[in-house]
Image: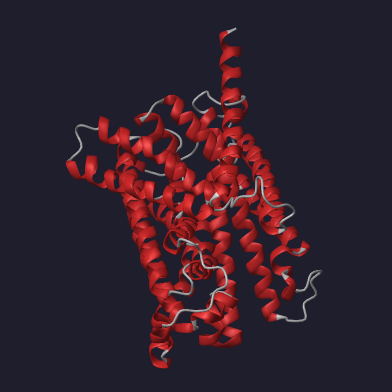
Amino acid sequence: MSDHLERRYGLFTAVCMVAGIVIGSGVFFKAQTILTKTGGDMPLGILAWIIGGAIMLVCLLTFSFMSQKYEKVNGLVDYAEATVGPRYGYYMGWFTSTIYFPSMTAALAWVSARYTLEFIVSAAPDFPLTVPAAQGGCVIGPECMALTLFYLCAIYTVNVLSPALAGRLQTGTTVIKLIPLGLMAVVGLIFGLVTGTMQQNFVTAAQVADTAENPLFAAVCCTAFAYEGWIIATSINSEIRDSKKNLPRALIIGGLIIVAAYLLYYIGVAGGATNQQLIDKGATVAFTNIFGGTLGNVLNLFIVISCLGTTNGLMMGCTRGMYSLAARGEGPAPRVYVQVDGATHMPTNSSVLALMITAAWFLYFYASNLACLWSGPFVFDSTELPIITIYTMYLPILVQWMRKEKTEPVLRRFILPAFAVCGCLFMVLASILSHGMGCLWYLIVYAAIMFIGWLADHLRRKKQAA
């Protein structure tokens, strides 16, 4: 056993982690949601993608500057600690370990399972499901739940037993997932212009029963999920070779790939199906319209691989969460969670706890968001609100960066961070207007979990002082 992680990843893996985590399920299933939120208004949906991408890029650029100066164990925690202070760094690490990483990992495992079943049912319409696909069996059926748990356990096993294989899985799935995006961007545009579908979608809105009260804000809030995940790449900064050079490069290159892929894909989808079809059946209908049933379904398989790659990237960050605290001598039982296995070079104890927390978030996600076992109190969107929270927690880091870093040029010290602050505030406003009371229920849960983090640290400090 040791307490240090091995530098095993190069620039290409880091780029693939940035792009691979972000480009996943969001661009596929949020495309339908965004069109619904905007009332079938395709240009407004494109504007939402542009705003969300711009916010991501300015935040990403600012944090790339920080990655050139600060490097310890876990990028985001390092930046919070260096700019605001050790206590804020601790709470940032606690939040990402107990809420942010596991809630997103749980949701992505479910999305992977859902699209797997949709692929199977499309290929074999008579495939028996306990709940028929027409009644939501691919979404909430027992087969979907069992497959979700299998994916969680399988990806966890790969990350814990062979982190090098997890890195190769990340690079491979990133390359694979760009295939359906590229095909749809090019072929969809041509198909849409030839058939007139593209022009029709840009001037004709669809019929939507539940258009959002604030459509642009609600749509941008949806893009937050699709664009989120890039910060997770900083969680492996201590495992990237020549991290101070390669990590900022990876963030910038990966970010540009993401924005270009999303915009081109969304426009391509607009050429493959009408707005009404996209709202009623989802973005995958564009694949079958253009490429036919067989080839279109093969491309759906690529979507499954894409989602699994995102889940793998999230798990890479998730398993290292508690270790990032323990390496600083903080959190509950740091001696336990700081241990790194001598054979796998992975923080095994931290990984086990991460899997348990992820399973708990999946239980909540299923009960409240999927099965809808209750309504009202403590029902909130656990795929979007933790992301908005991390934008809120960026604010003190960005402000302190502008205040402290007196040697940085004006662009790096003030201009880009100021745009990032505005973007974060926009996300918070969009969340409040979009989610309403859900924000309150989430904040209560958030406060309770953060209090547990404070209590765990307080008891540790008290024990050390005794």
| Residue 282 appears anywhere in the view | yes
Write the residue at 61% across / 39% down.
445
- Image check: 52 left or right of 122? left
Q: Which residue is outermost to the front?
A: 213
Picture colour scheme = secondary structure
> 312 or 246, which is in the foreground?
312
Task: Relative to 395, say whether 220 is above or below.
Answer: below
Q: How many marks?
A: 0
| Residue 246 appears anywhere in the view | no
Image coordinates for residue 37, horizontal then vertical, percent? 50, 66
> 346 or 279, which is in the foreground?
279
Image coordinates for residue 280, horizontal then vertical, percent? 59, 77
> 430 or 332, which is in the foreground?
430
Image coordinates for residue 394, horizontal then vertical, percent? 40, 40
Image coordinates for residue 344, horizontal then vertical, percent? 59, 41
Quarter of the figure that contains the C terminus: top right
Task: Relative to 127, say whether 1 is above or below.
Answer: above
Write the residue at 50% across / 34% down.
93
Write the residue at 23% across / 41% down.
414
Quarter of the figure that contains the N terminus: top right
Write the residue at 44% across / 29% down.
88
Q: Which residue is outermost to the bottom?
A: 195
